Amino acid sequence: MPTHDASPGLEARLALADGTVVSGPAFGAVGRGIVSVAEVVFNTAMSGYQESITDPSYTGQILVATFPMIGNTGVNREDEESPKIQVAGLVVRELARRHSNYRAQEDLASYLGRHGVLGISGIDTRALTLRLRSAGVLMGVLTDRSDLSDDRLVELARSAPGMTGQNLVGMVGCSARRAWDQDLGDWTWSERAQGNGGPRVLALDCGAKANILRNLTDRGCRVTLAPHSTGAEEIRRLYDAGEIDGVFISNGPGDPQAVSDVIKTLSTLLAPQYPPIPMFGICLGHQLIGLAVGGKAYKLKFGHRGINQPVRHAETGRVEITSQNHGFAIDTESVVAAGGIPTHVHLNDGTLAGFRLRDRPVFCVQHHPEASPGPHDAGYLFDAFIASMASARREPRAGAGSSGTTRP
């Protein structure tokens, strides 16, 4: 098996806005004078590093991995959540010297280098995580440039704009409507994916993960990606014409309050004069639906990023272990005041993890039911979305009609 060390003799430094500076061997895109300024966040997952670093929701963030060794299984094309690495940098305790997996096509260091992303190893990532938990997520600078002093790096981190107010969706979503027809290959386990009569889903692409789209396709859905800027009138036209059966609002990066065009579109679609179009939102999509109905968003101290986040289903009492990746949340009381019904609650801190609307087939969750990586406890939510579209099919298309509400 080949060995893949961090670049010998080349050092990188990570500086935080609170004055912390750590150094260690560089790997990935070394020797290119990279100065990456971004929000520093941590993920507690023991696996799935490739899915994490290619997740568009991590745009504008330097990722700290708490698991002590990263890179053991290499990387492969099939596990990518998007065509490129989305993180601004990667911080690890130890970079695996060897990768070993029958699906591996490349080692992690080469993969980062090919995508122009810098990594740093030899960092006590658990101590760093404790600092981020205590102080909250911080802006940071990751670089392999030796000509910049520690004080200068800290100054750059302190002067950088935070994630609040940042609309990053335009950096990761598609620019034109197109059918999502990626070959599922060995990923498919459902015979429904072979049919042509499944529901037609318009996915508003705010940075959609590939495995969300795979889950929909595997269940027989015909998915069309659409730019996040697609307007309410166009969506209504497609729905009234029978060209789509429902709308999915994807995950994505940045501050949900800054994505004003999508909030306006959803608010219009939820107006009484519009037909009750089935909708399902995940992560950022959940937040955008919450804002569209009149809810309020706020930034979490250090976010939820990991694959063992406990969530309780309010109506059944069932506890689900979920995958999560978000730094903002929707205020529960504001959603209830706007007529929303909470369906899921995060058991670690009581934050809202999902809600539905009383009079429309619209629901959303903060966690990731596609579980890539992570447990499959919440996979039933895709089936609930399909059921809501099937119910709405039986109702008149033009104008406002029956709510067709399906409970997640």
Image (cartoon, rainbow, N blue to C red):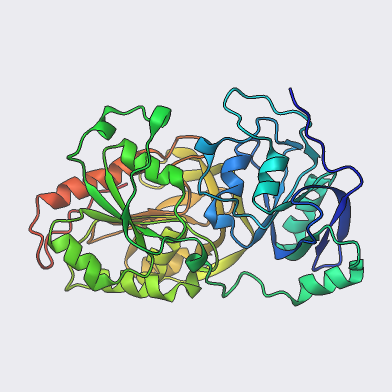
Tell whether 116 sits left or right of 369: right
Total numbered labels: 0
Residue 311 location (% of width, % of height): 49, 45
Residue drawn where x is 79% and y is 31% of the image: 97
Residue drawn where x is 13% and y is 56% of the image: 242
In this rendering, the answer to whether 17 lies above or below 1 is: below
Residue 268 location (% of width, % of height): 27, 74
Residue 389 location (% of width, % of height): 21, 49
Tell whether 337 sits left or right of 330: left
Residue 40 occupies which quadrant of the picture?
bottom right
Residue drawn where x is 19% and y is 62% of the image: 238
Residue drawn where x is 80% and y is 38% of the image: 94
Tell whether 30 sits left or right of 299: right
User: Which residue occupies the foreground of this view, 298 or 351?
Assistant: 298
User: Which residue occupies the foreground of this view, 77 or 290?
Assistant: 77
In this rendering, the answer to whether 21 lies above or below 122 is: below
Residue 160 occupies which quadrant of the picture?
bottom right
Residue 17 occupies which quadrant of the picture?
bottom right
Residue 132 location (% of width, % of height): 75, 57
Tell whether 137 sits left or right of 224: right
